[in-house]
Amino acid sequence: MSCGTGSRPGASPRVRARPKFLEILPPPPQALPAFTQDITPPDLSPWLTDHCGIPGVVHHEAPRPGPHVVLTALVHGNEFAGAIVLDRLLRERVRPTRGRLSLIFANPEAFARFTPTNPVASRFVEEDMNRVWSRQILSSPRRSVELDRARAILPVIETADILMDLHSMLWPGAPLILAGATESGRRLATMIGNPPLVVSDHGHKAGPRLIDYDRFSDPSGPYAACLLEAGAHWSADTVQTTDSAVRALLRHSGLLPVEPAPPAAASRQLMVTDIVTAETPGFRFVRPFQGGEIIRRRGTLLAQDGPDEIRTPYPDCMLVMPNLRPGRGQTAVRLARTLPTPP
Ligand SMILES: [Zn+2]
């Protein structure tokens, strides 16, 4: 099912193909390809003990007042590029010159299960930790490894002024910052400026992400959160992109001194208009699209899903993180259009 959010009335990416034109693509291969792995999991043992009352959470506070900046890594246990960068900040003894800095290793239990021979299996232990972030879910009696851990780190999240959640991507694609649905998230992502691709969206139907948590999604609230998708999960470039984005955030929020640097390229801002969900097990892209690709022509065939064709609903449509092997009910791709550049 696709949920249009008003790109143009009646313009849906999903169209039922007329039988005469329906060309059934071969079924997708079952096995995932072997993904390149040029980084290895960091040794986080010094930080997973109890430093500040919560294992896997390290705070540093400056004498001068300033914002509370929270960086989270390992919300998905197998995405450890962010953990490498937080580990680096801790080993380099980076301290805020004002305000408070909290570094969180969010799901160490899933991370501990990482194995290079099946690197996708340790995304979570029992459920996706990035679909549980609402006060309603977190205050429910339901329990899981991820819910228990989310509740354990919640006191830190509840005092964050600025939060960046560090992720990476399974399938190839341009690095980007997801800004959620708020203006504050978009401003924060634009201020970081690196990577310069800022995508506003309304999250997933399966549940709210950390950046969608009530504290950050209140449009009138002063708090801001964004999610970095820094590149392929196990690529050295992803660590570099994460490192640059984290240090840019710390400089712009005043926690680290501003360094003279050439002006960053202007961010490109996009808004997700449609979420295309695979409705059949035979969902198949017509070619292996890359995240960040812009499809110039409206009506371009992207995929077949059983009897349906998925086509671009407008010109210059950007594909956000296509999932080249979506299971039935999973997000296959998000479609985004460019927003006018703010003055
Ligand atoms: Zn992730």
Image: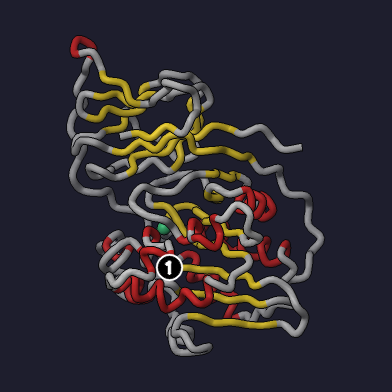
Residue furthest right as drawn: 260
Give SS at disc 1: loop
Residue 222, image x, y percentages? 66, 60
Residue under label 1, please give it.
74
At 19% across and 34% down in the image, what residue appears?
A: 282
At 64% across and 73% down in the image, what residue appears?
A: 68
Left or right placement of residue 147 versus residue 247 in this view: left
Residue 180, image x, y percentages? 52, 50
Q: Residues within 10 Å of mark 1 (few under 14, many from 20)?
A: many
Asked if 156 appears above or below 339 in the picture, the reply is: below
Asked if 271 appears above or below 262 in the picture, the reply is: above
Query: Which residue is more in the foreground, 38 or 3?
Result: 3
Asked if 103 appears above or below 54 in the picture, the reply is: above
Query: Which residue is more in the foreground, 293 or 4?
Result: 4
Question: How does the figure colour the protein chain or chains?
Answer: secondary structure
Question: Label 1 is placed on what type of residue?
Answer: Leu
Q: What quarter of the picture does the N terminus occupy? A: top left
Residue 337, image x, y percentages? 54, 32
Left or right placement of residue 86 versus residue 140 in this view: right
Left or right placement of residue 264 versus residue 308 in this view: right
Q: What quarter of the picture does the C terminus occupy? A: top right
At 34% across and 75% down in the image, what residue appears?
A: 148
